[in-house]
Amino acid sequence: MEPDAKGYFGRYGGRYVPEVLVEPLREVEAAMREAFADDEFWRRYRGLLRDYVGRPTPLTPVPSLRRRAGEALIALKREDCNHTGAHKILNAVGQALLAQRMGKSRLIAETGAGQHGVAVATAGAALGVPVEVYMGAADVERQALNVYLMRLLGARVHEVTSGSRTLKDAINEALRDWAGSARETFYVIGSVVGPHPYPWLVRSFVRIIGDEARAQCLETFGRLPDHVVACVGGGSNAIGIFSAFLEDGQVNLWGVEAGGSDAARLGYHSASLAAGRTGILHGARTLVLMDEHGLIAPTHSVSAGLDYPAVGPEHAYLKETGRVRYVSIHDDDTLKAFRMTARATGIVAALESAHAIAYALRLAAELDASRLILVNLSGRGEKDALRLAGAAHHAQEAAR
């Protein structure tokens, strides 16, 4: 599925940007179409995924995640096994190659949890292109490990102190930078958000997740999964795995949003598909969390990567068509799934991915052992474990 000529998925998408960004976006789209028609571009991209990123990633059945006998089997698509520890490297490498093809001498990016920032810094180091990353000050505090890694890799990290000091504000600053430097700069957007052609561009690089997973399910189990589950913030890992199953009507697709500390109260969650209204944010028409005055609402999630007040336009379209069902998971259930996965499987999942695992555990309890649930484990959780360990230490000190 591709957007229409104006960049819309149904009534969502488009290109709502200041005039200064119209031509840079047209330039990206023209370069993308040219590159996508060039077999040599794809050979180089797939070669880097194989030899540098480490694909294909494994598909791992985890029967030990069953809480009692007779429940459905859960299998994990292991994007945590990528170089840099998440699916973000797929998109970062692809866009960095496109930037080189366009003759750009500088990469900029935004990041929330830091995984996209680390991925772009890594791609820049590998290809010899300078990188600057915008990151909200709140996320800098809770993702110190990834900030260190970005700087270690040679990237300059700009700490954004405006607004809510999270991903939304980092994107605002990155767009301002790009508006004034588009001649030499390529903006590597980290999810299926933003103005056309970015939702389509990012989707094209991450769809390998679903293509691999579909083939692996057929090889390992002799059939397709009954359910596919992925977390949704902006929505790149979910689009990546859903893309291969959209035409398989017998496969149920589930997107899991951040229910935060209270999914019923605006400002306490990041569930834009559940509670958002049609609006425009960061250059696209999509579902946006807004207050009664139409102002962007504050958001909350235990995971920095899901702490965003909107969603990619293709997800908004997939919700409207009913092809994907979207649910939300509370912070507490996410943390339980994070701990359970580590103890039962030896895999430390990112808190983003733990949202998907938490919902898969609910599904498994409702289904018998003949059913198969495929979860996209979008990244590994060392970045979160460091923060949670610190929080646990402070709680113990307070209790004393």
Image: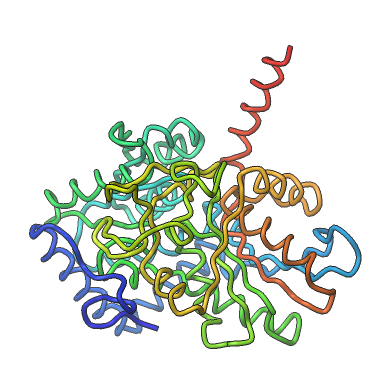
- The residue that appears at 16% across and 69% down in the rendered structure is 27
Question: Could you say which quadrant of the image residue 281 lies in?
Answer: bottom left
| Coordinates of residue 149 in the picture (x, y in percent) | 46, 39
Observer able to see residue 352:
yes
| Coordinates of residue 296 in the picture (x, y in percent) | 31, 47
Q: Is residue 93 left or right of residue 20?
A: right
| Above/below status of 91 relative to 157 | below
| Above/below status of 393 relative to 30 | above
Of 204 and 166, the residue lying toward us: 166
Question: Could you say which quadrant of the image residue 225 lies in?
Answer: bottom right
- The residue that appears at 48% across and 43% down in the rendered structure is 304
Q: Is residue 340 left or right of residue 335?
A: right
- The residue that appears at 25% across and 64% down in the rendered structure is 195
| Coordinates of residue 207 in the picture (x, y in percent) | 47, 74
Q: Residue furthest top?
A: 400
Of 108 and 315, the residue lying toward us: 315
Q: Residue furthest left?
A: 19
Total numbered labels: 0
Question: Could you say which quadrant of the image residue 186 lies in?
Answer: bottom left
* Quarter of the image with the C terminus in it: top right
| Coordinates of residue 375 in the picture (x, y in percent) | 65, 66
- The residue that appears at 41% across and 50% down in the rendered structure is 308
Q: Is residue 133 left or right of residue 257?
A: left
